[in-house]
Image (cartoon, helix red, strand yellow):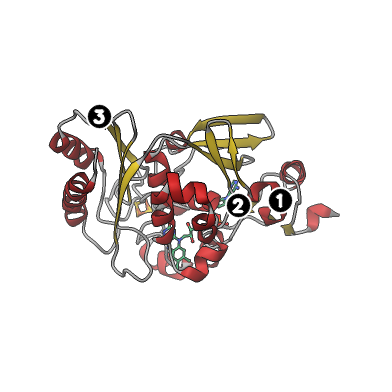
Amino acid sequence: MIAEKKYLQPVTIDEALAMTNIAENDFRFIAGGTDVMVNRFQGNETSSCLIDLTGINELKQIKKVGDYLSIGSLVCLSELKNSPEIKNEFPVLIEAANAVASPTIRRSATIGGNILCENRCIFYNQSEWWRNAIGFCLKCEGNICIATGSKKNCYSEFVSDTAPALISMDALIEIIDIDGEQKIKLEDIYTGTGVHPRNLNKTAIIKSILLPLHQNFVSVFNKLRQRESMDFTSLTTVVSANKNGKIKIVLGGVDPKPVVIEGTNKSNTEELIIQAIKKARAIDNEMLSRNYRREMIGVFLKRSFEKLII
Ligand SMILES: Cc1cc2nc3c(=O)[nH]c(=O)nc-3n(C[C@H](O)[C@H](O)[C@H](O)COP(=O)(O)OP(=O)(O)OC[C@H]3O[C@@H](n4cnc5c(N)ncnc54)[C@H](O)[C@@H]3O)c2cc1C
Ligand code: SF4
């Protein structure tokens, strides 16, 4: 009987995992739905069954676990600012969350959904009618990349704003799926290929995001977008330094995955900036040109190092 339902509402993780079995791989988890539902309206997400995770209360907590702060994957972006630990130890996460979409969307949008937000491209995030008119591309079952003419690679952009902040502070994620539980570095889930940007099993549920406590992080966040009021990123940069002098630069919006560069407070910052620009495989697939966005990497990172007190 349950298999005929199109919208399932588990209240425990075990129940959610059991439902993945029933839905025979033709399902999608949904949290706030602010990314999934737009993709469905545009015909880019067609699973016949949605498994809504928002009834699972254990995924909504923020708590200390050993040397980490554990942020449940279903915590809404608007709630992060209410956590004293996040305010005191990881304020850049609040800044990054506040840069996502609009206040109304941030009240539904979750942090788990944000780190798994689908890669974007101006030739892909369009209605089916629009895409049909120019011919479907690699990311929607066509055989060519419209942006580059390549028959092999898709460079749709990684656009999450919170993931660069989290990665810059060495976040781990806790994942559970039918094969068991594991903790991995957040940056390790991103593949760098635009068609399948993450290497998670389809049944994987993000339980929480873990941030290391007492690292005295100092961070600088920047986001380039067309409209300050509400827009996906054209370039997000975060630079974080910890108490041991480790520096981590993370870029979003200029590659199919987050670009990560590590150094120390002894590193030559100009060399770090050059490395970051070289590593970003931005292409002309959004409103701001590739050249402009690459130039802005240098501008943002230079400003970040000027602000950073290491
Ligand atoms: C107008 C508009 C503007 C936007 N602007 C921005 C922006 O500036 N920056 C930005 O980063 N995003 C932006 N977004 C995208 C989106 O709102 C956010 O990324 C949001 O945080 C997604 O969270 P969600 O809970 O709504 O995810 P959903 O849409 O519910 O899910 C997103 C993905 O995550 C998966 N998922 C969600 N939770 C889990 C979990 N616990 N375990 C496993 N899988 C899970 C879903 O299966 C899906 O693949 C915008 C969206 C809109 C409509
Ligand atoms: S980068 Fe190319 S293949 Fe990827 S979504 Fe854009 S047009 Fe399609």
Look at the numbered discs 1 and 2 and tell me whether their residues touch, using CB distance below 8 Å.
Answer: yes
Q: Residues within 10 Å of mark 3 (few under 14, many from 20)?
A: some
Foreground disc of the pair 3, 1:
3
Q: Residues within 10 Å of mark 2 (few under 14, many from 20)?
A: many
Q: Residue at x 64, y 31 (%)?
A: 181
Q: Quadrant of residue 256?
A: top left
Q: Which residue is mark 3?
A: 264
Q: Which residue is mark 2?
A: 74
Nearer to the camera, 310 or 11: 310
Amino acid at pointer 1: Ile
Quadrant the C terminus occupies:
top left
Look at the numbered discs 3 and 2 and tell me whether their residues touch, using CB distance below 8 Å.
Answer: no
Look at the numbered discs 3 and 1 and tell me whether their residues touch, using CB distance below 8 Å.
Answer: no
Q: Is residue 117 left or right of residue 274?
A: right
Q: Which residue is mark 1?
A: 56
Task: Give the secondary structure at mark 1.
Answer: loop
First-in-chain label (3 vs 1): 1
Q: Residues within 10 Å of mark 1 (few under 14, many from 20)?
A: some
Residue 75, x across and y down, in percent? 58, 53
First-in-chain label (1 vs 2): 1
Residue 178, x across and y down, in percent? 69, 34
> Mark 2 vs ligand 1: CB under 8 Å?
yes
Q: How many marks?
A: 3
